Image (tube, coloured by chain):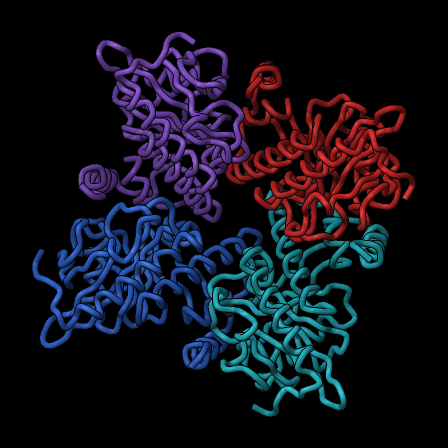
Chain colours: A blue, B cyan, C red, D purple
């Protein structure tokens, strides 16, 4: 462990653990993961000169055992700060995103079936559904092939998503990562990503889905980001 | 808010809220929606000179939180009459249908996967199942591409379904809307629509489904509308 | 009603109602039905000169409301003998099977997706899985196109299954019927049918499944019918 | 019965029964089985000169009734040692694996849909997902066509998996068998196998998935076997 959680961040860290533990239940609920795969993290903003931290799922733990106590805390270099278990094996990628995209407050990784099937072909998802225009603002992009062990996954995510409307990237041969202003937004993006990945796949099986004109995509995206939901 | 719920309609509005809250649970149960997508509404007939109202799901609210108190009330212009949250972002389309199709008592909108996959290709579903002849009386039609912001979605639904046997329309690149004499009938149509959309899709993946002769379609539709179920 | 349940058959009828109500829960559990579709029936052998009866699901009733009291009793002409609701709209087909196949004690009808997809193409399922050889003894046959209103569905089932090893028939453009020595066996055949319909469909999507030699089919079928399970 | 469970192995046998009963619940949970299909077994190491035993599911019993008392005990010839019911009809195959692969502590057999669909074509699953490289270390191999009644299924499993990284084999026209150091590992392999079988199938439906370079496969496999999870 590199440091303790500072007292001034204790309440915020504990709240994030509760939220992230609860959000993990959404992954099996929407059938985005099997066994212990998949992970959700959330940034906790630093206070009083202490740098940011993030909370994340431990490695290889069953979804049945994921209460707030099981969630671990890491610094933005991905080093364990608090927790009795090893952090997720994808921790370095989450940490890289938090270091390089300060606007990102939540990150989710899954191997959800249809999104991963597009990723295995190295093919992005074309924007042919109004629901895609709403949430993703256009096509969902492909990220590079990269394997665990250095910064290459994190770098691939950041270089693909920086300046892109889409909160989701399909890492080639691997699976999707999604980002959001908090963990809940990133989970929502994962859920909607799998739904559009499935729907566009099914549509393409029997012909060519019709493209949506760019000005309609822009209009839908703008409205959804600014108007949808409860204010 | 444009007006209050008149006292003479209070009991009917409250009953509709209960029914519509319960019917929303059918959408995730039959896997027609993810996250907060999809919505059900039901008309409440006007009384003593008060015009009709309808009840509908609020925007962007989790299915776990949808009890009768969360359901909001709108007038037929789609303006909020009662409720602490914004109505569904599809409210204008529901309102348009209630204004222009007085025989319609319930409307449902989802992005159910297989129905939406047909919609993304702009292709109606051919009538190759006796279950389709029973419930839809023939093929399920495609409606125009239309985006949120004016009356174009509502108009597209009404122009497609008026004079058509099918209680379902596939709005191009968007998803299905279904209508019924009440909310329960419209929900039933949504559930059966997704089932026939999936079954015909699967059948077509390995060859051409056999058409049903028109006179058999007519005979099945007539019997089902007049005989099926408990009288 | 044509007659009452004779006192000598009361206990057997009540037992069959309990069994059939419980077995109906297997249909949504294994995702063979949506909404109120599908039905299970079981023969009750006649006693003391009274002819056979059968119990069956009422028409258009939700699976949530199917307790033993909701199950209705019919004679082998399909006329209601006991029950406060109309029998399933498929009752005439069940009755025809019981009249013409005295060895059959249970009948199940569903519109399960993959089995119905084969039926819509008018194509039987080839025997390419050991599980098919075990349970169906070879390919699953197609029955004729027939619509409700006379004996044509029941006759199509009986003419296809008489002398066939398979307890399942795919009625063209309609869906599967399965038979068994009792309702439980017929439900099991419906569950396994959908599983093999799905697996062979999926296999054929990417090439040609390998046939199983006839002598291996015969050997598997013989062993399974005589050895499998608890004696 | 050939012998009793020796007193020195009683506690270990009872623990294995508990574990294996609980692990059976994972098969329907991850939708790997229908009805009573599928089975899990675990080796119990011999003590004080008594040879090894293994515990396994009884034949044709519902997943709802599978508590520890229902699990039966066999010797490595597949003969029943303890239990009031017949052992699974696949017992001879499990026994063969335990006799010939002393490093194997758990065996699982299912007919999971997508894995069985590859098996029906006699086609192994190519390694195009990092998750496959992690868990399977390369492609998942096909085993020979073999039917129940002698040692041919067990021999086919052992000859295919011996010296192979993959803990899973797709027995042609039949379905998958997986092995592991204990029953839990073998169940995990079954769950991940179905997920990769489905994902690669879906990916191939719309084009050719991209292969992963061999050195990346090797690197991923090595890391996952040695680093992943809690130590």
Q: Is residue D80 left or right of residue C46?
A: left
Residue C76 or residue A146, whichever sits in front? C76
Quick check: can you spot residue B23? Answer: yes
Residue furthest toward the right? C2
Q: In this view, does D153 lie above or below B179?
A: above
Q: Can you say which quadrant of the picture contains the N terminus of chain A?
A: bottom left
Q: In this view, does D180 lie to the left or right of B74?
A: left
Residue furthest toward the top? D2
Residue D24 or residue B224, whichever sits in front? D24
Q: Residue at x 64, y 26 (%)?
A: C136
Q: Position of residue A163 (x, y in %)?
A: 29, 72
Q: Quadrant of residue D82?
A: top left
Q: Can you say which quadrant of the picture contains the C terminus of chain A?
A: bottom left
Q: Is residue D8 left or right of residue A64?
A: left
Q: In which quarter of the image is residue B162?
A: bottom right
Q: Is residue A105 above or below residue C90?
A: below
Q: Position of residue A70 (x, y in %)?
A: 25, 53
Q: Is residue D187 above or below residue A182?
A: above
Q: Residue at x 64, y 40 (%)?
A: C22
Q: Which residue is drawn at 38% across and 55% down?
A: A27
Q: Where is residue C211 in the image (x, y as percent from the top left)?
A: 57, 24
Q: Position of residue B211 (x, y in %)?
A: 75, 48
Q: In which quarter of the image is residue D101?
A: top left
Residue C208 or residue D64, whichever sits in front? D64
Residue furthest toward the left? A2
Q: In this view, does A207 lie to the left or right of A143?
A: right
Q: Is residue A116 above or below residue A223?
A: above
Quick check: can you spot residue D170? Answer: no
Q: Residue at x 24, y 56 (%)?
A: A69
């Amino acid at each position: 462990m590199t440091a303790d959680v500072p007292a001034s961040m204790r309440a915020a860290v504990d709240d994030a653990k509760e939220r992230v533990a609860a959000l993990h239940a959404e992954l099996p609920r929407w059938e985005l993961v099997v066994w212990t795969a998949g992970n959700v993290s959330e940034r906790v903003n630093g206070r009083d000169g202490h740098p940011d931290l993030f909370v994340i799922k431990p490695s290889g733990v069953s979804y049945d055992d994921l209460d707030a106590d099981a969630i671990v805390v890491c610094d933005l270099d991905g080093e364990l700060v608090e927790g009795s278990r090893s952090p997720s094996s994808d921790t370095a990628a989450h940490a890289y995103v938090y270091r390089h995209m300060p606007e990102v407050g939540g990150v989710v990784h899954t191997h959800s079936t249809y999104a991963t099937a597009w990723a295995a072909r190295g093919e992005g998802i074309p924007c042919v559904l109004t629901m895609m225009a709403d949430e993703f603002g256009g096509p969902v992009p492909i990220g590079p092939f990269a394997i665990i062990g250095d910064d290459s996954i994190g770098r691939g995510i950041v270089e693909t998503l920086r300046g892109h409307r889409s909160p989701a990237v399909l890492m080639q041969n691997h699976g999707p990562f999604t980002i959001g202003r908090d963990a809940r937004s990133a989970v929502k993006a994962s859920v909607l990503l799998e739904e559009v990945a499935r729907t566009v796949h099914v549509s393409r099986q029997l012909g060519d889905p019709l493209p949506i004109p760019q000005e309609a995509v822009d209009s839908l995206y703008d409205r959804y980001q600014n108007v949808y939901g409860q204010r």
